[in-house]
Amino acid sequence: MTDDVEEKPEVRYLSLIRKEGGEPVIGIPYREMSVDPDLVASFVIAVIIFENRQLKSFIKEGYVVVIEEGEHVVGLLIVDRIDDDVPYRTALNQIISKFESTYENQMITWKGDIRPFREFALEILQVYPYRTFSLKMIPKLVTKSDATPDNQAPIPWSVGETDEKLQIVLGYINGKRTIEEIMNQSEFEDSEILAILSMLDKYKWITLTRKLEDSSMLLKIMEPPKFLVGVYGEQLTAIVEQCDGTKSLATICEILPYNIEAVKLVAKNLIDAGVLGYNTDDKEVEL
């Protein structure tokens, strides 16, 4: 994870529940919670659906549970404690409205199969993506040889039209294009691109880095591995020692002096190896 990636801090869980029978139609966990969201959902089902009582919100162990009802489903949004729930309530109502207009026939002729609704996660993640990114970020596919057992986990929402869109977005990712460039070249809405990238990042199909500029400021994180020193020699050590988070790459090239393009190539390899990172105070960071 880099400093250009920000987890959505407020949203913990979002669920849509069928009103008539109380079945969870789709549920998206965002972050860990100190309370089981399924238990919270069960409470909401009991009060609203089975006891036929009105319930718009309540607080559970420091979390605010925002509740809205549609014609066929109840929406449940769990967020950290907030002063104003209106933006979340508005967004939840929009999600419910979109869901019911999309799946009205399936709701009316309910057959008990919730699998067709999984692709609707793309609509939800356009409103609340897993994470937000700087458009300057460059996504890079995690290859099978690089992947550890927890990389490239199956994406549960990659079905139907969502899967088709996801595969197209994967085709744009070459380790060179920025997110902004992918948006400009793709026929999809920007919100769809960001939602899909948040899926790919969440399930570890991609890593993200930033485009190195002459003005980029890097910080030494660890000593370079011997094999890289063997490849680049003393020049590599000299570059690493100059990366103190206060000097731009252009400045480092003037001090040493080295060719700027050669330094960028070495610096990129050092970032990939975890030797260098971006200075968190770098003005180039945009979230």
Image: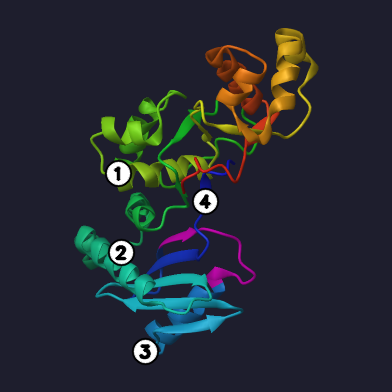
Query: Can you tell which of label 1 and label 2 is closer to the viewer?
Result: 1
Seen from the viewer's position, the closer of residues 15 and 208 is 208
Q: Name the residue beneath numbered marker 2.
A: 95
Please tell me the numbered disc located at residue 54.
3
- Residue at 53% x, 69% y: name it: 38
Local SS, label 2 = helix
> Alpha-carbon distance for marks 1 and 2?
18 Å
Residue 115 in view, yes or no: yes
Q: Quadrant of residue 88?
A: bottom left
Identify residue for label 4: 6
Q: Residues within 10 Å of mark 2 (few under 14, many from 20)?
A: some
Identity, as a three-letter code, of the amino acid under mark 4: Glu
- Magenta part of the chain: 26-38
How far apart marks 3 and 1 lie (CA) works out to: 37 Å
Q: Of the numbered discs in the image, which one, if any, rests on residue 85?
A: none
Amino acid type of the residue that numbered disc 1 sits on in the rendered structure:
Asp
Q: Amino acid at mark 2?
A: Ile
Instruction: Judge whether residue 36 is colored magenta.
Output: yes
**Mark closer to the chain start, 3 or 4:** 4
Residue 253 horizontal/vertical position (percent): 60, 18
Distance from disc 3 to disc 4, alpha carbons, whole Å, reads 35 Å
Q: Earlier in the sequence, mark 1 or mark 4?
A: 4
Q: Residues within 10 Å of mark 1 (few under 14, many from 20)?
A: some
- Residue tagged by mark 1? 190
